[in-house]
Image (cartoon, rainbow, N blue to C red):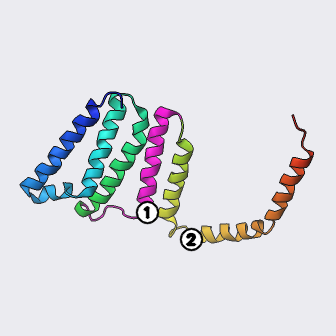
Amino acid sequence: MKNKTAFSGILFIGLGLYFLAGQLEAPVLRLFQGWPALLAICGASLLGQAYSAREHQFIFPGFLLLGFGLELMLPAAFPSWPRGVNVFFLIMAIAFFASGRKQKSGAGFGALFLLLFAIATFSGRIQPLFSLVQAGLSSFLSFWPLGLVAVGVYLLWARRK
């Protein structure tokens, strides 16, 4: 970190609010107690550093920490908040997409995690489609050795430059 003022400032503000919430013991502020709040504070600090000092390498870990912290904090306040592995896949996809906008890489991984999120979320609803795909793949996978033969033939007879 070249210029640590944004990171340090946001971190101190977050930690101050964290400890103030512990001192006041208000029921509303209980949401901001515990280690998930510390994850969110560190993530917000990294995002502040990434965008204010244009150190874009901190976007990915910032979104991860902030997202994981919020995912672990918010179900206590909102009972209808979605839970499960699929939400973590969504957080990973958002982190890759946000990082990819500034660093020009990572969109492929973002799409992969978004696909995993969709599969994990809707797998119960589209179970008949999965059984159809599984039947098609099982017949296709019985011929996978032919792929090895094709690669061998290509390697033997392809022109070398």
Amino acid type at mark 2: Gln
Q: Classify 10 Å Cα crowding around label 1: few (below 14), some (14-19), many (20 and above).
A: few
Q: Quadrant of residue 145?
A: bottom right
Earlier-in-chain disc, 1 versus 2: 1
Give the camera-side residue of 122 and 46. 46
> Is 90 on the left or on the right of 146, as rendered?
left
Which structural element holds mark 1? helix
Q: Which residue is mark 2?
A: 127
The residue located at (70%, 71%) in the rendering is: 135
User: Which residue appears at 39% of the width and 48% of the height?
Assistant: 64
Q: Main secondary structure of the magenta part?
A: helix
Q: State yes or no: discs 1 and 2 in contact (Cβ < 8 Å).
A: no
**32 horizontally vs 120: left or right:** left
Q: Amino acid at mark 1?
A: Val
Estimate the x, y position of residue 127 in percent, counting from the top left: 56, 70
User: In which image quadrant can residue 9 be found?
Assistant: top left
User: Label 1, on which residue?
Assistant: 85
Relative to 77, say whether 18 is above or below: above
- Between the residue at mark 1 and the residue at mark 2, the CA separation in whole angstroms equals 18 Å
Q: Which residues are magenta?
A: 78-104
User: How many labels sit on residues?
Assistant: 2
- The image position of residue 140, as x and y in percent, is 77, 65
**Residue drawn at the location 90% of the way across and 39% of the way down:** 159
Q: Position of residue 19 (x, y in %)?
A: 14, 50
Outermost residue toward the right? 157
Task: Report helix, strand or loop for mark 2.
Answer: helix
Residue 21, magenta (yes or no)? no
Question: For the residues carrying marks 1 and 2, which lies nearer the camera in this image?
Answer: 1
